Amino acid sequence: MNVVAIIPARGGSKGIPKKNIKELAGKPLVAYTIEQALASRHITRVVVNSDDVKIRDVAERYGAESMDRIEEFHHDNSTQEVDRLLYWIVEQLESEAEKIDIVVLLYPTAPLRDIESIDKAITMVVEEGYDSVLSLYEDTTYLWRLNSDDTASATNYDPKTRGPRQKEYWNQWAENKAIYVMTRDLLMSQKCRLGGKIGHVEMSRLRSIDIDRPEDFELCEQLIKAWIK
């Protein structure tokens, strides 16, 4: 099957300047995701889409194809921005080559994802009847919201019945933005990465870090250095 991994990597970043090509334990951040995609048993094509020529140069240096994007997708400030970008990328790729069967979305901000989880998610779509699959981690956090009157309210538990943490019954999972796999037909018909019969692959909290702030970057770097040792 024609399984295409798409890695969207904008040049602009408010929290960490030039985040996608910032050196993380000796390599540009985006390089980790490229190497994971290339190591997959199922992915047949790896495309980095970016508005930044330096990111595209790095992508090619690490073995991926690079692709520019139109002005409409230079910003990340609208509803379903990435889903609309995926739709446009698939249209462009199919205008130049054969039809795509499976789309794999991999954000470069999740450098600690494991290759086995990527392949498991693809297998679930190809062989097990799922239309889309995403990666999750179990979240046992007691969640609160801040109200307009400056008070706080619990949202997922009752403080009056709080028990020992290990005895709580949790069915709460967080989207970690590491892996999304979908059929091409689902994406093009619904213009959304998730739909139909949705499956999941579970990842650990350590591998679920999504780099958004400087402290995320620092934590990832320390973990990578520790694992290499």
Image: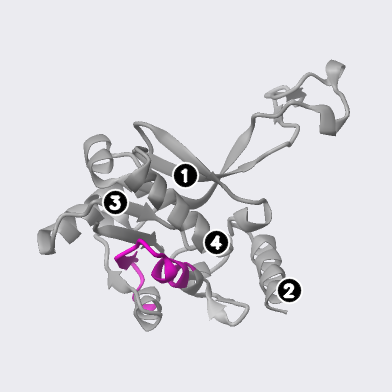
The reply to whether residue 83 is in sight is: no
**Callout 3–callout 2 Cβ contact below 8 Å:** no
Circle 1 residues within 10 Å: few <14, some 14–19, many ≥20: many
Mark 2 surroundings: few (<14), some (14-19) or many (≥20) residues within 10 A: few
For residue 13, above or below residue 32: above
Query: Residue 119 at what x, y percent from top left?
Result: 44, 57
Other-residue count near label 4 (Cα within 10 Å), few / some / many at <14 / 14–19 / ≥20? some
Quarter of the figure with residue 214: bottom right
The location of residue 4, given as percent across then percent down, is 30, 59
Residue, disc 2: 226
Sequence-wise, the earlier of marks 4 and 3 is 3
User: Label 1 amino acid?
Assistant: Leu
Estimate the spatial distance between the alpha carbons at disc 4 and disc 1, rounded to whole Å: 13 Å
Q: What label does residue 134 carry, if any?
A: 1
**41 or 14: nearer the viewer:** 41
Q: Which residues are magenta?
A: 33-54
Q: Which mark is residue 102?
A: 3
For the point 29% across and 51% down, the residue is 102
Helix, strand or loop at mark 3? strand
- Magenta-span inclusion, residue 43: yes
